Image (cartoon, grey):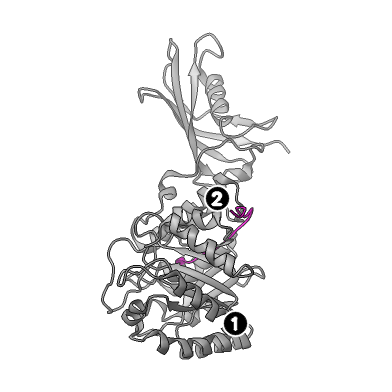
Amino acid sequence: MPAIPERIQICECWARDGIQGEAQFISTDVKIQMIAQMARIGIKRIEATSFSSPKLVKQFADAVEVLKGVPRPDDVSYIAIVPNEKALDRLLDCCQAGYGVQEITAIISASEDHLLANLERTMAEVKPPLAQIVRRANAAGLKVIGCIGTSFGCPLSGEVPLSQVLELTDWYLEQGASYIMLGDTTGEANPLQVRQVYQEARARFPEVEFIAHFHDTRGMGIANSLAALQEGVRYHDSSLGGIGGQPATNRPKYHYGLTGNTCTEDLLVILNEIGVASGVDLNDAIQLSRRAEEVCGRELLGHTTRSGPVRHRHPALLTAAALPAGLEIPPSIYLWQPGQGPAGGEAVVATVIRAALEKSWPLPAGLGLEAGQVQGQAWPESRTVLVTRFTVLEAGPAPVLSALCQRSDGQVLFQGPVQLTFSA
């Protein structure tokens, strides 16, 4: 068994695979803003758009405008889907004008039934024009992701032979593909199968960088991503909120249930918990996923967007920078025992607040706390368990927190704004 990579790269697919099934058109400005935020929070590979026919997939009628508008950090690689040579012509015009992409994705299905359903073409008919796309893209200096859809099974034909997947991998490499993506197009894969497929694929093609692309149709997206990780795969696709799937077109639907990708924020949780670096801050991803929900107009599928990260005490001292506006600090328990501290008033409020904050961070020396506006009830006369929670109201050098302290029966003991000051 290969070692789990110490670091992986996530490709964020929300702006392409994620929204291609959305019925409403998402504005160009919003797409650009979302992509800019992805780059800002540390995502280095981003599916920016698709050059599918605007008549067929209306969501990407603005592909050129999106590429014109996105920021261009040196360390971010943008990816576009290129389904045919006409699409490649349009993209290469963008590249020549200075607002292209660094990578393209070329797609073929391992299942011929799936090809017929999507393209009305056989494997033999699809290969020659696809090979030409790969070669032309290479000649233009673009990296090519050779995507093999339905690598783990097909909703139309059932099992897909691994030999077919390996044969297509070899074919893509002969054409000049830079990466090979094994796509679980409709969520057919299971973790045991994923490990077996990647074991054989990596043994046969040890120098190839494989990309894991899973859908969560049957609730196994995260499990399958982890299985690929355990086989040494370093490149993983995912989507904010776990959305994605079959484009919104007039073509018949060929499978049922959820269509979304492995969820980015849920994937980040497991990476954090097992010590695999991604360069992406989980809290930033949660905030961006909430923005994605606003854009899509509904609650998406990310578990972590609702629950927040797994709780751990931060190893570093609390700083003002660790308290962005809107942050909800997990609740903390304090055992109030009369006679063991201040009798009441602002002094005991400060004691309880400090104790609650210290459950999440070591507190720096000289941390100031102003709680004069906190409204309190009469302090209990007997031993009482207190639950305290905070939300950051205002960020900055002197953050303001909204504090709520309750007894274990729910009765509010005190609540109100608390201001922290940090010594230089």
Q: Residues within 10 Å of mark 2 (few under 14, many from 20)?
A: some
Horizontal side of residue 318 vs 56, given as left or right: right
What residue sits right under mark 1 in the picture?
176
Where residue 379 appears, as percent x and y from the top left, is 44, 16
Q: Residue furthest top?
A: 339
The relative height of residue 307 versus residue 93 in the rendered view (above or below) is above
Query: Of residues 343 and 112, which is closer to you in this image?
Result: 112
Where residue 77 appears, as percent x and y from the top left, is 60, 71
The relative height of residue 307 versus residue 183 in the rendered view (above or below) is above
Which residue is rendered at x = 48% and y = 66% of the image?
A: 13
Where residue 250 appears, as percent x and y from the top left, is 27, 79
Mark closer to the chain start, 1 or 2: 1
Magenta stretch?
1-14
Horizontal side of residue 301 vs 325, given as left or right: left
In the picture, the disc for residue 271 is 2
Query: Of residues 54 and 13, which is closer to you in this image?
Result: 13
Q: Is residue 187 at least partly visible in the picture?
A: yes
Where residue 17 appears, as percent x and y from the top left, is 43, 69
Q: Is residue 68 at least partly visible in the picture?
A: no
In the picture, the disc for residue 248 is none
Main structural element of the magenta stretch: helix, strand or loop? loop
Residue 423 falls in image quadrant? top right
Query: Of residues 158 and 141, which is closer to you in this image?
Result: 158
Query: Of residues 264 and 388, which is closer to you in this image?
Result: 264
Q: Is residue 238 magenta?
A: no
The relative height of residue 353 versus residue 108 in the rendered view (above or below) is above
Which amino acid type is marked by label 2? Leu
Give the Cα distance between marks 1 and 2: 31 Å
The relative height of residue 299 versus residue 164 in the rendered view (above or below) is above
Mark 2 element type: helix
Horizontal side of residue 388 vs 135, given as left or right: left
